[in-house]
Image: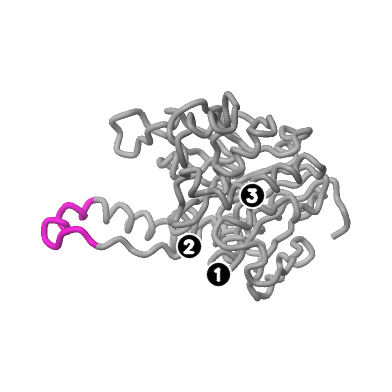
Amino acid sequence: MSSPSRAVITLATTKMIYVDMALVLARSFVFWNRDSGIPFCLFTDVEFDLPRELQGHVEVRRMPAGALGTGFSPKLHLDKLAPADQTMFIDADCMVMGPLAPIFDRFAGRAVSVFGAYMTEGIWWGDVGAILKRIGKPAMYGFNGGLYYVERGATAAKVYARARELEGLYDEWGLARLRGRPNDEVLMAIAMAEHDLAAVLDDGTIMVPYNSYQVFDELDVFAGRCSMTNPPPGAKKHREGVPVRTVHPVIPHFVDAYTHHWRYLAEAERLRLHLQTGMPRWLARIYTFATISIPGWLKMNGKEWLRPFYRALFGVRAVKANERV
């Protein structure tokens, strides 16, 4: 890849499961942005063959195993990986539901940025008030690390160098771990605050994690429609600390086990069938509706309906190990 003005990158390291997610992301990017002039680069230490429909659209850059650390640590090296003047990192477990050029426009001019919310107190991977007191700043931004924006230059290099330095102080600062590992989000938030860098305020239009808005009203990658809701307090799927609203993100983020949700699986297969085999979109919709959406909906709702009877008879099942750990 030459040095483009804009690029999208993702990471898929240590396990094939992350490569599989990254290929879904790449297909959704290609579907919506193939003529944008924005290249897509996948960084990995896993051996795999790039599917033929992505060849010529996706560049795979291979790294030695563990070169950037493990867990969430690789995301603290985006300044080194950024191949363009403006680089957008998107987590592998996301999908792209539309053109990304307008998102680049919203971030333009920010050395390092995210899509987040202003915070002065509370608990977010640590005591926010205590963190701010330690760094001598009035506020910081909370966010989901599924998206980072980086512009080449000295400021970005300093911010990421500071985040990597803070990783070694993680426990000393009393920060909470995620899956037993330091979380990139709080480290980057601190480093950004120390350098007086602001987030693009969260209005629900750019990137939204599914665990924050747990009512999925619609997901249609071919139509570019995504609708997610956090219902009012008292509703079963209400999420405290998240605005009560319906959002329409261009980049839905399927965190944790949500890549097993039937909506994600159906859209992933529709993309594969259309791009890899040339199946018409209408036929891909019908096929996946019959083979994934209907069985998935029945299984999900059947579990909800039958769960009280199962627990009355057999008790609570053990929680399955997280395959991402």
Give yes or no for residue 253 being in the magenta stretch.
Answer: no
State left or right for residue 204 relative to residue 236.
right
The Cα atoms of the two marked residues, 2 and 3, are separated by 25 Å
Q: In the rendered view, would you say 60 is above or below 250?
A: below
- Which of disc 3 and disc 1 is earlier in sequence? 1
User: For the residue labelled by badge 3, is the local secondary structure a helix, a strand or a loop?
Assistant: helix
Which residue is at a point 69% across and 72% down the rendered structure image?
64
49 relative to 216 in the view: left or right: right
Q: Amino acid at mark 1?
A: Lys
Mark 1 sits on what residue?
A: 15
* Residue 171 badge: none
**Image position, residue 264 (x, y; %):** 50, 54
> Which disc number belongs to residue 324?
2
Q: Is residue 298 left or right of residue 252?
A: left
Most extreme residue toward the right is 2
Query: Is residue 316 on the magenta stretch?
Result: yes
Residue plotted at (57% across, 66% down): 20
